[in-house]
Amino acid sequence: MTTTIDSGQKLHLVFGGELENLDGVNFRDVKGLDIVGIFPDYASAQGAWKSKAQATVDSAQTRYFIVHLHRLLEP
């Protein structure tokens, strides 16, 4: 039997960059990705994502994403 400890943290990563084309999620410059940060909950991650997405609205090929890190950390 395995025991998991729920710390209550639901970590989320927000990052983005310019895509090679709008049909996929391949980035033009992986080394140049904009790592916005890691956030303790979805609401704060969504706020950061929205701010970055709105700031780059004139760049059609720039996209920002939210990654649910807590899902990757669960056993």
Image: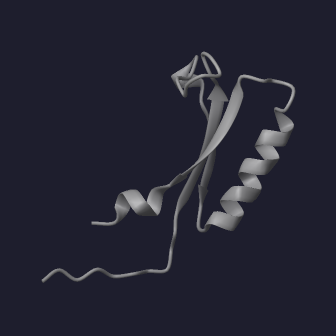
Residue drawn at (74%, 53%) of the image: 48
Q: Of residues 21 and 36, which is closer to you in this image?
A: 21
In this rendering, is residue 1 above or below 11?
below
User: Where is residue 37 drawn, in percent x and y?
Assistant: 62, 50
Residue drawn at (78%, 49%) of the image: 50
In this rendering, is residue 21 above or below 46?
above
Q: Of residues 1 and 23, which is closer to you in this image?
A: 23
Task: Give residue 58's quadrant in the image.
Answer: top right
User: Where is residue 23 drawn, in percent x and y?
Assistant: 60, 22
In this rendering, is residue 75 above or below 37?
below
Q: How many marks?
A: 0
In this rendering, is residue 43 above or below 20?
below
Q: How is the image coloured?
A: one colour
Q: Is residue 35 visible?
A: no
Q: Is residue 34 visible?
A: yes
Which image quarter is the C terminus in?
bottom left
User: Where is residue 38 drawn, in percent x and y?
Assistant: 58, 55
User: Where is residue 9 drawn, in percent x and y?
Assistant: 51, 74
Task: Give residue 27's quadrant in the image.
Answer: top right
Q: Would you say 29 lies left or right of 64 here?
A: left
Q: Would you say 61 lies left or right of 4 here?
A: right
Residue drawn at (81%, 48%) of the image: 51
Which image quarter is the N terminus in?
bottom left
- Furthest toward the left, the residue is 1
Q: Would you say 42 lies left or right of 51 here?
A: left
Q: Of residues 37 and 44, which is closer to you in this image?
A: 44
